[in-house]
Amino acid sequence: MSVPQSLSHSHIDFVGSDFEALASHMRHCARAHGRWFSLRSHMQRVHALAAGRIVTMACVAVVLGIGLFAVT
């Protein structure tokens, strides 16, 4: 008795696909932790700190600029 193609078990290579995903992840991590990793990490922290306050810092800069212009 033949089994229809849709009911037959297909051969799926879970181990091979998991291995490829892990290898891809490891290559990505190796590239991410390259020469400039510490600088990029520091810049990300600075960006996260400044991003929430960018409008406030711009307003303070404008007020200081106007104040310095008024004094001179």
Image (cartoon, helix red, strand yellow):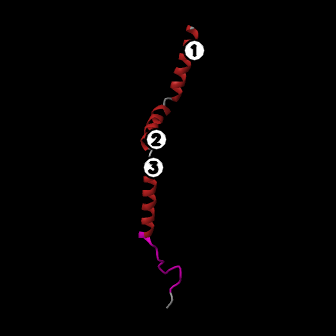
Q: Point out the stretch of residues depicted in magenta.
A: 3-15
Residue 40: which numbered mark, if any? Answer: 2
Does residue 56 belong to the magenta stretch? no
Seen at 43% across and 41% down, the residue is 41
Q: What residue is disc 1 on? A: 66
Seen at 51% across and 25% down, the residue is 57
Q: CA distance from mark 1 to mark 3?
A: 43 Å
Provide the secondary structure element on which disc 1 rests: helix
Q: Is residue 60 above or below residue 10?
A: above
Whether the residues at callouts 3 and 2 have beta carbons within 8 Å, the answer is no
- Secondary structure mostly seen in magenta is loop
Q: Is residue 17 above or below residue 59?
A: below
Q: Is residue 6 above or below residue 18?
A: below
How far from the left and from the top, in percent, is residue 63? 54, 17
Choose the circle earlier in sequence order: 1 or 2.
2
Seen at 55% across and 8% down, the residue is 71
Does residue 12 belong to the magenta stretch? yes
Q: CA distance from mark 1 to mark 2?
A: 34 Å
Q: Residues within 10 Å of mark 1 (few under 14, many from 20)?
A: few
Choose the circle earlier in sequence order: 1 or 3.
3
Q: What residue is disc 3 on? A: 32
How far from the left and from the top, in percent, is residue 30? 43, 53
Residue 5 falls left or right of residue 46: right
Provide the secondary structure element on which disc 2 rests: helix
Q: Quadrant of residue 59?
A: top right
Seen at 45% across and 72% down, the residue is 13
Which residue is farthest top? 71
What's the residue type where badge 1 is placed? Ile
